[in-house]
Image: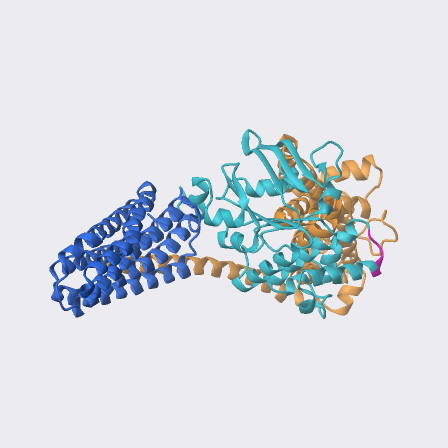
Amino acid sequence: MKLSTKKKIYQGIAFNLFRLMSGILVVVLISILSFIVVRGIGVISWDFITKMPEDGMTKGGIYPAIIGTLCLVAGSMLFAFPVGVLSGIYIHEFVKDNWFKRFVKLMTNNLAGVPSIVFGLFGMSLFVNTLGFGDSIIAGSLTLGLLALPVIIRTTEESLKSIDNVFREGSYALGATKIQTIRRVVLPLAMPNIITGFILSIGRVSGETAPILFTVAAYFLPKLPSSIFDQVMALPYHLYVLSTSGTDMEASRNMAYGTALVLIIIVLLLNLIANFTRSYLSKKVKH
Amino acid sequence: MIEAKNLNLFYGTFQALNDISMKVPEKSVTALIGPSGCGKSTFLRTFNRMNDLIPGVKIEGEVIVDDMNVYEKGVDVDNLRKRVGMVFQKPNPFAKSIFENVAYGLRVNGVNDEKLIKQTVEESLKQAALWDEVKDNLKKSAYAISGGQQQRLCIARALAVEPTVLLMDEPASALDPISTSKIEELIHELKKKYTILIVTHNMQQAARVSDHTAFFYMGSLVEFDETKTIFTHPVKQQTQNYVTGRFG
Amino acid sequence: MTHFEEELKHLKHEMNIMFALVHTQLSKAKDAFIRMDKDLAREIIQTEKRVNAQELNIDRDCESYFALYNPVAVDLRYLLAVLKINSNLERTGDIAEGIARFLVVIEQEFDEDLLQSSKVLKMFEESISIMEEIEAAFENEDTIKARSIFKQDEIINKINREANERIAEYIRLKPDNVEQALYILSTIRKLERVGDQAKNIAEEIIFYVEAKVLKHSKKV
């Protein structure tokens, strides 16, 4: 057989293999989504997203869980974003490349791999008990924030690394100090990438169940929180409750699918907003 | 007056500059040529202490700028860099508007008078022969203009803090021929006011723009003379081999 | 060897051809003069066209090297020297042709006494010898030999200076032969200029090899 034909056949096999794999991925994704949409769309209504749950969570809405999840996402990001970005800046721009830096980086990577239930237990022991916050939004937010921290630190570091040194040098060459250089030149360039890390952590935080299990989530609490020291319901936990330990499992089955759909839509919306911010920032930087 | 006296520079244990003494003539263009890794860029960067940013650099000897050894203890490096402007190989405007790029040096050095800033920005852009091309778009991002314009913007940015010396590290190597010749014309104009040191790999460019040329090889200054002499009858055989392209 | 070096080698080859051509023209002029060979003289006049063509050829090469290779330092000096040596050689070729044109029109044999007293044959020998020397100096980039040209040129100049008096004396003795005496004087004058051209070429060789300008200065 001619070499060229052989190469063509080989290429054809490889390409089709790639097509098959990505095809499977798309099929799986679409079936999960459509499964949830088909089952869940029926219960979605204005009442569903604005009413309190009723009748042992078999009727009514999931309003407090939505608000709870939004509170937790906002709270955790309020904590994790500044802390993560500042740590990332400190590690990348200020710490000399030595064993300490490598150790911190290793620990950060490890932290990203720790199961979320461990964060939950840690949050309970530190925030709920030791610091005495009790089961509260603040305890849950801080726990979720800790979970998101490694991702934000890592992406901050990576995006700072990707900024060409010529920009730093250009700033120093004009007599700028290190702080001025970072604040006025490096950060504006790195921000779009940092935001990407932010988006990823929002996605992760809003779907987590384990960390909030012992720190904030209420099984059933048909009212809105009045302060950051209140307990709240949260979508992921509510979903878990509806599907495993409701008062009437059959009756709440559809409610569970509806809740899942709402959770997916919220994550999607948050991602869209963050994505929009990112492309706006990067446009401002590039054009 | 800028000058290097018995300058040695080490990166760790590697000696990058070897006992260099050289007086750079004022208000003229001095070109530094030599093969890659010969130390010409490193030498250029000793004048504004840009090498300080690299870990493990050790420097012996003196570098004199305005009658002062810049490596003496207690020298204000930020202030030195204000007096010794630098233009880099790749145009590196900041992620800001054209106006703010030029104003940057003033702002980081504590100038707040908006009227003064506006006036300096205009003057600097005029000096860099860019004013007419951008005067209606000062608010636009610096990335919206061409590479050649960006490089002239970087020159304007350096001029805005009123340096006496201008260091240029291959300022035209990333540009097309027309932009290159604009930069070269600009250098020719600027030497009336500034002492210019330029590193270039393009020997024709060194020949066109400079008054004096220094040939570096393996960290040593092999020959330093008028550009005319270097390109018609250099004294050292190594210089001859390099400028005629028979190197190695 | 770089591409440009190969081009320069090619140019040197062309220059050697030019040297050989002019050298041969001069030798033939001498032979034609001694034998009063009008056919050979006509051949010289024909060959002059080849000399001119070769001059243009080398000029064109130099022009394109300047345009394409941006020569500097020794290359620049070499090309500048080649350009000037080329035109010096072309003029030397003209001299040989000028002598040949005399020979074509002249009617009678030269008087043996005149040849003896004017030293015109010695002049031929010296000028051919100086051509050989300068050709060798160029071939080997030999500046010592190039410097020896200046001495040799002085011998030629001396014969030339003495020629006036000798010819004048001869005319006083044989006023009938005044015409051929003047031919001889003119030939000596022409050959003297061969020495001048050789001297110019020697200066160019020293310029490109040593980067020293000897023109219009007291010679070393």
- In this view, the residue in front, C162 or B188, is C162
Residue range highlighted in magenta: B111-115
Give residue B141's position: percent from left, percent from top. 69, 63
Tell me where residue A59 sits by quadrant.
Answer: bottom right
Q: Which chain is orange?
A: A
Q: Main secondary structure of the magenta part?
A: loop
Image quarter hosting the C terminus of chain C: top left
Is C84 magenta? The answer is: no
Is B114 magenta? The answer is: yes
Q: Is residue A202 above or below residue A133?
A: below
Give residue A260's position: percent from left, percent from top. 67, 59
Q: Which chain is blue?
A: C
Q: Residue furthest front?
A: C173
Q: Can the viewer see residue C101 in this picture? A: yes
- In this view, the residue in front, A162 or B82, is B82
Residue shown at 60% from the left, 38% from the top: B22
Q: Is residue A239 above or below residue C51?
A: above
Q: Residue furthest right?
A: A226
Residue shown at 44% from the left, 40% from the top: B238
Visual hue assigned to chain B: cyan
Give residue C97's position: percent from left, percent from top. 23, 64
Give residue A151's position: percent from left, percent from top. 66, 46
Q: Can the viewer see residue A54 in this picture? A: no
Numbered marks: total: 0
Q: Is residue C159 above or below residue C171?
A: above
